Image: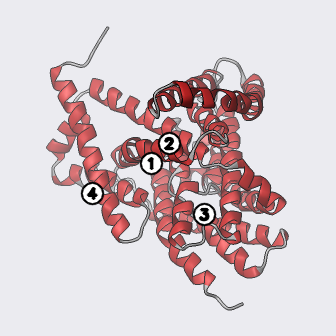
Amino acid sequence: METLNHKEVINLLLQIATMLIAARLFAEVARQLKQPAVVGEIIAGIILGPTILGSIMPDFQQYLFHSNDMTNVALDGFVQISVVLLLFIAGIEVELQVVWYQGKKALKIAVASMALPIIAGFVVAYAFPEFLGVNINDRVVASTFFGLAISITALAVVARVLMDLNLFKTQTGLLIIASAMIIDVLGWIVFSVILSLSDSGTGGLGVWPTIALTLIFTLIMLTVGKGLINRTLPWINKKMAWPGGLLSLSLATCFLAASFTEFIGIHAIFGAFIFGVALGDSEFLTEKAKEILHQFINNIFAPIFFVSIGLKVNFIESFDFGVTGVVVIVGLLTKYYGAYLGGRLAGVGRKVSIVTGFGLSTRGSMDIILGLIALEYGLVDDSLFIGLVILALISSIASGPLMGWAGKMKI
């Protein structure tokens, strides 16, 4: 069996150390500027990647991140694990009781805020595939993906913004959070189906068996699976070392769920996400346990993923002003107006609808993961991926001030 040699082990450890240090430094800068940590982590990756470090010190950047294939494969594996764990804690954030409490209002807002970007994004990408950079050989799937990519809300980022604005526990804040949770669940189900329809995304089971198994898996995890979790968690908390037993078994089950969905032709992240929803909704998963999982993943694995984004492409050489402009304008306007119109249709007041529109326009995590997967599957090119990252940065930076301004409006 081929293993990493002495130099490759050193190289891998240097890569991870450099990424973690840079991510922490720039996350702290972002925090001082009252911005989400993800903004600083993405910028750290752009600086470490071919865009900045590769231009200033190309030999050093090449040595550190591209010196040999074995180290690159090992780092890629670490990044894949990071993505799976990131979706796992995103699922934990989905509180089904909050969704049920907000009920039809949140559902209408979520559907409207997704429908308008998906339709507009599909039309634009299908009409101008070569300009926008979607795979013309997989045109329908790639165009649908683009619409979906600009329809996703970053649940973790918007939750942090609402906390900073002291809106998290208000009726408006809970409505935004519930809508974002529904968007997350719907978005990943739709994306999993889209990926199974792609030329490169379907496993050996075929499209319809894959879709059927995906729906069955989701239903079982949120019913029978949730029941099993409620039965076993008290035993784990009582009989095993805490929090070690909970951490090891929850992560092991997360990887099992992820491996199952990968096996049936759906990306591994979907299994991790749905298991996270089932686990997070358990009454026996304490807030302290959730906090431990969040701290462990958000401060070690999540930064590795977000820094890795900047290592994938050159943000100067592959930047296309026209493509980025279309992505940003279509993404911001359709998402805002979709959520605003959804609020009005749901009987929500104009002011709350405006705040909700700005809140659900927040990107910066799940949409980037989705974009990176599409880039790896060849559904989009570098310029469109860069446009999605810039959309995420702009919306993450602007959502807080815009919600604060809208909240003070006199209507």
In this rendering, is residue 370 above or below 264? below
> In the rendered structure, which amino acid carries the disc numbered 3?
Gly
Q: Position of residue 260 (x, y in %)?
A: 62, 22
The residue at 76%/22% (across/down) is 209
Q: Which mark is residue 86?
A: 2
| Dot 4 or dot 2, earlier in sequence | 4
What residue is shown with label 4?
Answer: 25
Toward the viewer: 200 or 65?
65
Q: On the image, which quarter does residue 270 sit in?
A: top right
In this rendering, is residue 315 above or below 193? below
- Work out which residue is located at the far bottom of the displayed protein and give it: 410
Q: CA distance from mark 2 to mark 1?
A: 23 Å
What residue is shown with label 1?
Answer: 382
> In the rendered structure, which amino acid carries the disc numbered 1?
Asp
- SS at circle 1: helix
Toward the viewer: 45 or 173?
173
Residue 25 left/right relative to 352: left
| Dot 2 or dot 3, earlier in sequence | 2
Q: Position of residue 82 (x, y in %)?
A: 44, 37
> Which class describes the residues within 10 Å of circle 2: few (<14), some (14-19), or many (20+)?
many
- Work out which residue is located at the far front of the displayed protein and give it: 238
> In the rendered structure, which amino acid carries the disc numbered 4?
Leu
Q: CA distance from mark 1 to mark 3?
A: 18 Å
Q: CA distance from mark 2 to mark 3?
A: 23 Å
Residue 105 left/right relative to 312: right
Q: On the image, which quarter does residue 59 sit in?
A: top left
- SS at circle 2: helix
Q: Position of residue 64 (x, y in %)?
A: 20, 38
In this rendering, is residue 292 above or below 115? above
Circle 2 or circle 1, nearest the eye: 2
